[in-house]
Image (cartoon, grey):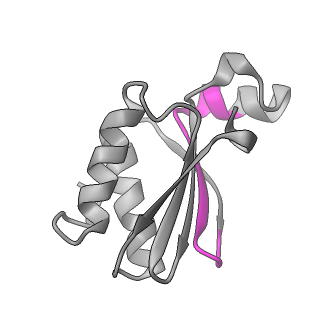
Amino acid sequence: MMIGGVDIIIPTEISPLQQIIAASGAVLRIWPGAVFSHVTADAEVFIYKNGIAKRAMDRLGVVPELADTMIHVLAREGESTVVVDDPESEPIKTFLSDIRRRLSGNGSTHLS
């Protein structure tokens, strides 16, 4: 579950800031009510499905009941690491397809 989640490394030529913007756009497509937390100068962000999921994780920690309600993105020069619980579950699978497209430079890095 998340802390021991699945790390997916996606090569990219876009900057870490553009990677975070791309990830944000991909997340907002699957989770319109997403809550962004712990955005750091190191280009790292934790994205929760919604405020309910964030409050539950803050209160309970990482528990199986909250699987697939948070995505961790760590952007670095040359690659973006995305951590998810189950890369084959929907809508996470849709998110991963979208972010791969966006990070390849073949998709928009805008928040739309």
Image quadrant occupied by the C terminus? bottom left
Image quadrant occupied by the N terminus? top right
Rendered residue at 41%/34% (across/down): 92
Residue 2 in view: yes
The picture places residue 47, in percent across and down from the top left corner, at: 56, 47
Q: Looking at the picture, does residue 24 appear above or below residue 67?
A: below
Q: Is residue 44 magenta?
A: yes
Rendered residue at 40%/70% (across/down): 11
The picture places residue 110, in percent across and down from the top left corner, at: 26, 65
Q: Is residue 48 magenta?
A: yes
Q: Would residue 28 be found to the left or right of residue 5 on screen?
A: left
Residue that sits furthest to the left in the current view = 106
Quarter of the rendering containing residue 59:
top right
Q: Would residue 46 be found to the left or right of residue 29 on screen?
A: right
Q: How many marks?
A: 0
Residue that sits furthest to the top in the current view = 65
Q: Would residue 45 be found to the left or right of residue 33 on screen?
A: right
The picture places residue 104, in percent across and down from the top left corner, at: 26, 68
Quarter of the rendering containing residue 40:
bottom right
Rendered residue at 44%/35% (across/down): 33
Quarter of the rendering containing residue 89:
top left
Residue 31 in view: no
Magenta-drawn segment: 40-54
Q: Looking at the picture, does residue 83 appear above or below residue 105?
A: above
The picture places residue 69, in percent across and down from the top left corner, at: 57, 30
Rendered residue at 64%/78% (across/down): 41
